[in-house]
Amino acid sequence: MSKILYIPLDERPCNYIYPNYIGRMRGLELCIPPEDLLGKFKKAADVEGLWLWILEHVKGASHIVMSMDMILYGGIVPSRLHHLPEELCRERAERIRKLKELEPGIRIYAFQLITRAPARDGSGEEPDYYEDYGYRIYRYGVITDKIYVGAASEDEKMELKAIKQQIPAEYLEDFLNRRQINFRNNIVTIEQVEKGIIDYLIIPLDDCREYGYAPAERKRLSSVMAEKNLLSRIAMYPGADEIGCTLLARAVNSQSGITPLVYLDYSSQRGKYQIPSYEDRSIGETVLYHILAAGCEEASGSEEADFVLAVNPPTPFSLKLEKELITDDIILESERNYPAFISRIRRYLTKGLPVGIADCAIPNGADRALMQFLYEQRLLKDLTSYGGWNTSSNTLGTVVSHMAAWNAAKSLGRLTDEVKAVSEEFLFLRYLEDWGYMAEVRRPLTDRLKKIDPALNRLDLKDKEPEVRKLVKDRLLEFQKRYFPETHYEYKVSLPWNRMFEVKIDICRND
């Protein structure tokens, strides 16, 4: 059994539970730090305790998959809130060389986010002043980036002058200073690649747009990388919470000595060229980054492929279904040919090709029209993988990683009944969470919160989490009974950050 150390971005299920499924499918000894070292939400992890844990467990590991945001700041949210001295961050980044001294053959796969700047007011995961000035701080970044590339209008230049007067100077200074420190920390990490300490690095753009702070910093970082002859050795593309799984899949493929070929299929030809919400480029470009980062390559045809990645991309219409057109109706849109898409999927399956569906049409949940097609055609259990959660890249990385782990087990002759059971369990978990909770249960229950307690809102359940949790579980059981009546998994439900955005589902096992 091969040993891999995994240092997550934070303690949420997507960063803590999902990777464990990837490891179990491949039969790895996946060493993950105990949750009590990882902090919670805005509380930073015990970085020094975590470092000691790493030193204690690194011997015998072939790879370490490491979140630099966890190592430097104590997690993703603390990376947006910290006031750490730059010198301390540099020391934390540079001491990872110790790992190669202790285990000379280890390969280090790391990722470090470009800090986000959401396009809205709200201090849920941001500094307190983002509650009132968040959107204006976001616009400040967009306009300054557009000015830099010569794309700003005169109206936008006037808007920038007004924003500078409206945001208290100390708030803007705090935000920009932290970004500058984080940016310089990105460069320090790039230097670790240059020195041969980090073997592969991803710099994901978290919650980004076509213009703004993140695209501006991406351009500057690419110049640094080119100067160091690293432009082709470091990946930069949209993503965040899925990157741990992506790098774990890369480690799995590296250990297995394989480079899977992935055939791509899209439900919408127009959608292939659509820029998803919270991202800076068309999904057709982003998909290729995810495949390569996971240690796979694109197949030129399905006949040479190891597996199929069937992408349900966004379209201008589907992107409205998250915020602008809220409806309980299942709408069949004109720019998406589901009958043809489903027919091709059935043909791949008939030929023995495993298929994973990356459902990226609607942010933060499954496309109910696609799921209805799959349900009616009795294909839900025939898929190897499915994902439809949060951003397009979150979904893509999760599905590609699941498929890569499954393929590695098959390629090595280790696709046992036990491995198949783990894979099927993860598939069911994705259906239950991405389709059941996010697309069917969350919004109706969120609308009921005020009836439970007028003080509740979707981002703060106060002391009512146990009551809301029970309602979530009841609704999910109804969903399971309707769509998966022959599935008998038992599970526990909780809302880990005391809000409605994500859910933690622990499937109970007898092993």
Image (cartoon, grey):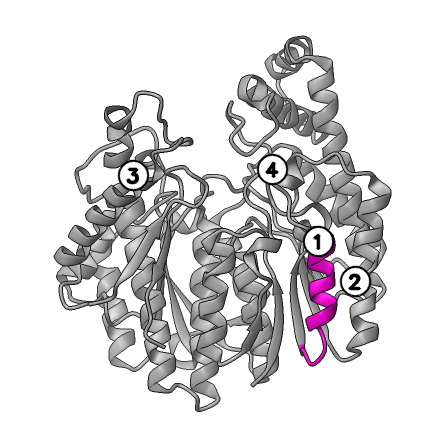
Q: Amino acid at mark 4?
A: Arg
Q: Amino acid at mark 3?
A: Val
User: Residue 476: image x %, image y %?
Assistant: 23, 51
Which residue in the structure is indicated by mark 1? 71
Label 2 crowd (10 A; few <14 / some 14-19 / many >=20): some
Q: Which residues are magenta?
A: 47-62
Q: Is residue 343 left or right of residue 67?
A: left
Q: CA distance from mark 1 to mark 4?
A: 18 Å
Q: Amino acid at mark 1?
A: Ile
Residue 268 image label: none
SS for callout 1: helix
Q: CA distance from mark 3 to mark 4?
A: 30 Å
Q: Which of the pair 15/367 is nearer the observer?
A: 15
Residue 96 image label: 2
Main secondary structure found in the magenta portion: helix
Which residue in the structure is indicated by mark 4? 116
**Residue located 37% across and 38% down the image:** 500
**Marks 3,2: beta carbons within 8 A:** no
Q: Nearer the viewer, mark 3 or mark 2?
A: 3
User: Residue 163: image x %, image y %?
Assistant: 64, 13
N-term mark: 2 or 4 = 2
